Image (cartoon, rainbow, N blue to C red):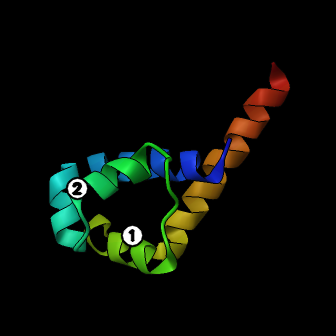
């Protein structure tokens, strides 16, 4: 799994767990709603600055978000080797 795809899956999951729409997350993180969508679709990867901005409304440390992305990639790799 690509890093951007994994980040997008994690971002969407965390956003939904926080009860935020893409628009509200964008407003809270001072980012455009369409950029949130692009990130969730895995079409772009965030900068470190963006990761820090997203971490505040998601109530997660940036390092925790990165660890979740790593877990997503490893889980996908493990399931791919079982096929």
Q: Residue at x 82, y 23 (%)?
A: 82
Specify the quadrant that holds the C terminus: top right
Q: Nearer the viewer, residue 12 or 49?
A: 49
Between the C-alphas of marks 2 and 1, the distance is: 20 Å
Q: Is residue 34 left or right of residue 5?
A: left
Choose mark 2 or mark 1, whichever is in front. Answer: 2
Q: Is residue 40 left or right of residue 6?
A: left
Residue 51, by quadrant, is bottom left
On the image, the x and y values in percent for residue 80 come to 77, 28
Q: How many marks?
A: 2
Q: Residue at x 31, y 65 (%)?
A: 58
Does residue 56 show up?
A: yes
On the image, the x and y values in percent for residue 26 come to 22, 63
Q: Residue at x 48, y 66 (%)?
A: 46
N-term mark: 2 or 1? 2
At label 1, counting other C-alpha atoms closer than 10 Å, the crowd grade (few under 14, some 14-19, many 20 or more) is few
At label 2, counting other C-alpha atoms closer than 10 Å, the crowd grade (few under 14, some 14-19, many 20 or more) is some
The answer to whether mark 2 and mark 1 are in CB contact below 8 A is no
Residue 63, by quadrant, is bottom right
On the image, the x and y values in percent for residue 50 come to 40, 74
Q: Circle 1 — which element?
A: loop
Residue 1, by quadrant, is top right
- Residue under numbered circle 2: 33
Q: Is residue 73 left or right of residue 8?
A: right
Q: Circle 2 — which element?
A: helix
- Residue under numbered circle 1: 60
Q: Residue furthest right?
A: 81
Does residue 19 show up?
A: no
Q: Which mark is residue 80?
A: none
On the image, the x and y values in percent for residue 72 come to 61, 46
Q: Residue at x 32, y 55 (%)?
A: 36
């Amino acid at each position: 799994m690509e890093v951007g795809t994994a980040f997008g899956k994690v971002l969407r999951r965390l956003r939904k767990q926080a009860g935020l729409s893409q628009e509200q997350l964008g407003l809270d993180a001072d980012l455009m709603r369409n950029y949130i969508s692009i990130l969730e679709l895995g079409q772009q990867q965030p900068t470190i600055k963006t990761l820090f901005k997203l971490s505040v409304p998601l109530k997660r440390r940036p390092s925790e978000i990165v660890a979740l992305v790593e877990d997503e990639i490893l889980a996908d790799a493990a399931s791919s080797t079982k096929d």
